[in-house]
Amino acid sequence: MATKIGKTANGDALHYSVGVIIKQYGKFLLIDRTTEPFGFAVLAGHVNENETPEVALVRIVDEESGLKIVSHHQEYEGEVQGNWCNRGIGVHYWYVYECEVSGDPILVVTKAKSIGWYTPEEVRKLKLDPAVHYWFKKIKLI
């Protein structure tokens, strides 16, 4: 399905994206991405045409981890400049959610080299995807 595309106030193209913060027992679920932008990241992806952010949230969590969402709330919404994706777009409008999930995460090798739980101290030492670093700082998770 095609990615939902919008425009910035300047008329530049932007993508709508969803980021998913999953924290259990004091640890964050992160993947080590196999595609650009490289680095450790929360589960994330583009919103497809004719898809709401909430529908994208459920799809992305399932596709990238096999987990099921039990509950969620929005932590952040806004445009992030200089946030390049592998499709050549440098501006993204992000919907970032914190979720409670059920199940055990599975590694999806087309998405990540690894998937695992990391303490805030461990997260601070990792090379994070630039967008994830931005949100974690903005919402004071690290």
Image (tube, grey):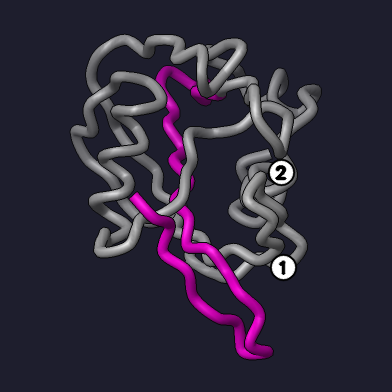
Q: Residue at x 68, y 89 (%)?
A: 10
Return the residue at label 1.
81
The correct choice, above or below, for 68 with respect to 13 in the image is above
Q: Residue at x 67, y 27 (%)?
A: 40
Q: Nearer the viewer, residue 22 or 34?
A: 34
Q: Main secondary structure of the magenta part?
A: strand
Q: Is residue 56 left or right of residue 23?
A: left
Secondary structure of the residue carrying numbered label 2: helix
The stretch in magenta equals: 1-30
- Residue 14, image quadrant: bottom right
For discs 1 and 2, the disc positioned in front in the rendered view: 1
Q: Nearer the viewer, residue 10 or 41?
A: 10
- Residue 4, image quadrant: bottom left
- Give the x, y percent position of residue 76: 49, 60
- Give the x, y percent position of residue 64: 41, 26
Please state which amino acid type lies under the numbered disc 2: His
Q: Is residue 81 magenta?
A: no
Return the residue at label 2.
133
- Give the x, y percent position of residue 141: 61, 42
Q: Residue at x 57, y 22 (%)?
A: 31
